[in-house]
Amino acid sequence: MAFYNKIIKKSIWVFHVSASPCNNCDIEILDLITPGYDIERFGIKLVGSVRHADVLLVTGVVSYKVAPRIKQLYEQAAKPIFVIGIGTCTAGGATFKTSYNAAGMPLEKIIPVNAYVTGCPPKPEAMIDGVLKLLGTLK
Amino acid sequence: MLKYLFYLLVFPGFLFASVFGLIVGWIERKVSARVQFRVGPPFFQNFYDVFKLWGKEIILIKNTPYFIFVIAPIIAFASVIMTSTIVGMSFFYHVGIGGDLIFIIYLMVIYSVCLILGASSTGNVYSSIGAGREMKMLISDELAFVLVILVPIIQAGYKIDLTQILAYQNANGMIIGSASGIIAFIVGILCLQAKMGLVPFDIAEAETEIVEGPLMEYSGPLLAFWKLAHYMMYVFLPMLLVILFWGGMSFASFGSIMAGIGKYLLIVVVMILIRNTNPRVRIDTAINFFWKWASPLALIAVILAIIGV
């Protein structure tokens, strides 16, 4: 298992889950694959299907409408799967913390979460740092 | 018997084609990255990807014929191994089996048919769109591909063995030197682009549009089979063109070995550059292109070859 973890660190396929976000973090996530940041250097690739994913990047405050879908998406992903909450919304709600409609605040109420990258929105450097730090905890 | 098992499993077959295919896949990703002013992935990236996929979970879908779902990538992978063995045998050892060109055409259709079957067994909307598009690509590029293959067959005196075509070229000069040869070679590169699903014709797997279409529901080792089969096609399809038109590779001297590798890499880099400098075409544009332009051009090449130009 240790050897497998060593390999999986070098090949991370990321699936982008937008759970009722304000679209700000999503734009920053798409920034990651532009030539300026080029996360393909670390073997990180954005994939379109959740079946191929190793990491789910969840953005936004999970509302009551979206919560069952997030849970379903997590169950559809091939294990082992890691979840990273992007933005302050997933951790503490940010602007929407007093909302009547926030079901997953923090996101752990819905699905298990491995790491949070806070910020509104977090910079692409912070996201790369967060992903690599999460991978550093794998033994 | 043991010799052929070695061919199938080790040298031109499974082991060589998968390792070399993953390396060529790295070349593809690196060149694409450099074209887009990026740094690109490290050398062993494709090895990491495939190894990681072997450790992931396979997800089968309830209430679908998942026997087909599981068996399709395995059959496709087996057919790709057999094709690379046959092409590699004539490329490296100059030995062939009788009528291997016909065998190659059939095996390559099996790959596409397996992709269609595997995708349509899932019931996913995107997968079925991808399966339909793959079917349309198959009927559009198959005619041009067969016509392209006919040109060396006719020039070599109606021989359907790769070794006999190679022997003809050693005696009478390369087929690419003739008028019919150069036309068929150019159409052949476009056909390879469509067969491999590279960008101007990656309509079936359009990642930004129908998110890898046919492969959408595949996960874990089954996806690894598809990825490996795709990278192995990078090994034998350019090799097939080198054998058919460009005189293959001879082991007479160091220079001729380098020349053979150079021909192969040149075709691969041309394919990668076409992939990076063109947008994806629509399915009707692709069918129009192959039926109105590529196939008639290949037919002209066949007629020229019959005349003897």
Image: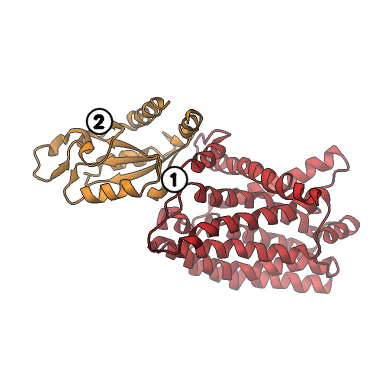
Chain colours: A orange, B red
Q: Quadrant of residue B95?
A: bottom right
Instruction: Give the camera-side residue of B308 and B245.
Output: B245
Res B204 visible: no
Residue type at numbered disc 2: Thr
Q: Mark 2, residues whose alpha carbon is within 10 Å: few (<14), some, or many (≥20)? A: many
Q: Give the chain of mark 1.
A: B
Q: What label does residue B57 carry, if any?
A: 1
Q: CA distance from mark 1 to mark 2?
A: 30 Å
Secondary structure type for disc 1: loop
Q: Is residue A82 visible?
A: yes
- Residue visible at 87% across and 60% down in the picture: B168
Rendered residue at 18%/51% (across/down): A65
- Nearer to me, B66 or B26: B66
Q: Is residue B270 above or below residue A113?
A: below
Disc marking residue A118: 2
Q: Position of residue B213 (x, y in %)?
A: 45, 58
Relative image position of residue A11 (x, y in whole percent) = 47, 36
Q: Crowding near pointer 1: few (<14 within 10 Å), some, many (20+)?
A: some
| Horizontal relation, residue B259 to residue A15: left or right | right
Q: Quadrant of the C terminus of chain A?
A: top left
> Residue at 55% of width from left, 66% of height from top?
B137
Q: Quick one: A119 or B48, which is closer to the camera?
A: B48
